[in-house]
Amino acid sequence: MGSIGIEKSISLDGFITGPDPTPANPLGDGGDAIFAWMMAPQPETPPTDGTRPLSEEYQEQIGGALEATGAVIMGKRMWEMIYGPNGWVAPDGTAFPWPVFVLTHEVRKPETCGITRFTYVNDGPVSALAQARAVAGDKNIGVAGGNTCQQFIAAGLVDEITLHLVPVFLGGGVRLFDHLGPEVSGFEPTAVKTGNGVTHLTFTRSVVS
């Protein structure tokens, strides 16, 4: 059975988007600053389809984790940001292959957009996790979206948290660690690496014997 992990770019003041994120502006105002390390320089003639090349650091830091992932669980708000006829795609236009389980109160039938299979889960995180495990097999499961990450952390369901810490202050937006307190514990730092305008931090849940 694979692990359950969270991987997020985050500002120094704890935000994973800038202020006022919307489907048309999913990163919020100024939120692109915390993802700049992922982007390679634009070619002299930018692609006409609006895609952007990804940096070597992105491939080094995230590429292996993407290959090891078998399913993703997210909330309705993040789903609204990434949903489209082509499914969930990276900035360079590459489609993510994983099935996505969306926590929502809205009843919807499963659907496939591009190569992304969306399943809508109305009965909470534990049910979403069981469904994700059924399709992920031995691969890992990713958890995405601020509120959904908080629910999984609070429930003790997260094995690893990777933060790509960018030295900017956004002053508003979606916080990753809202609604969590001292009752949540058990993580220890297991990796630190300085990158190009970003520090990569990994925290792993301690195994209690």
Image (cartoon, helix red, strand yellow):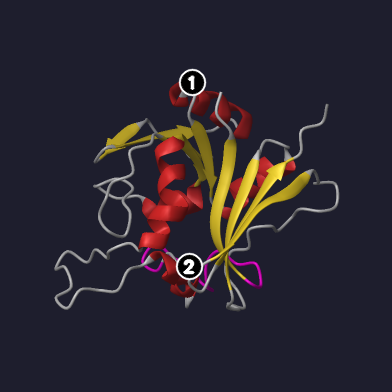
Q: CA distance from mark 1 to mark 2?
A: 32 Å
The one of 147 and 32 positioned closer to us in this rendering? 32
Question: Can residue 107 be spotted in the picture?
Answer: no
Q: Given the image, on which type of amino acid does mark 1 rest? A: Ala
Q: Residue at x 27, y 58 (%)?
A: 92
Q: Quadrant of the N terminus?
A: top right
Secondary structure of the residue carrying tag 2 is: loop
Is 36 on the left or on the right of 40, as rendered?
A: right
Specify whether residue 21 is painted magenta: yes
* Label disc, if present, on residue 17 of the rendered structure: none
Residue under numbered circle 1:
134
The one of 204 and 156 positioned closer to us in this rendering? 204
Q: Residue at x 57, y 47 (%)?
A: 6
The one of 190 and 5 positioned closer to us in this rendering? 190
Question: Can residue 13 be spotted in the picture?
Answer: yes
Crowd around label 2: few <14 · some 14–19 · many ≥20 (10 Å): some
Query: Does 92 appear above or below 100?
Result: below
Q: Given the image, on which type of amino acid does mark 2 rest? A: Pro
Q: Residue at x 25, y 55 (%)?
A: 93
| Residue 193: % across, % down | 58, 61
Decide whether the magenta segment is chiefly helix, strand or loop: loop
Is 119 on the left or on the right of 44, as rendered?
A: right
* Label disc, if present, on residue 21 of the rendered structure: 2
Which of the 4 image quadrants contains residue 14? bottom right
Residue stretch rendered in magenta on the structure: 12-25
Secondary structure of the residue carrying tag 1 is: helix
Which of the 4 image quadrants contains residue 57? bottom left
Query: Does 115 appear above or below 191?
Result: above
Q: How many marks?
A: 2
- Looking at marks 1 and 2 on the same chain, the residue that comes earlier in the sequence is marked by 2
| Residue 13: % across, % down | 66, 72
| Residue 2: % across, % down | 55, 29
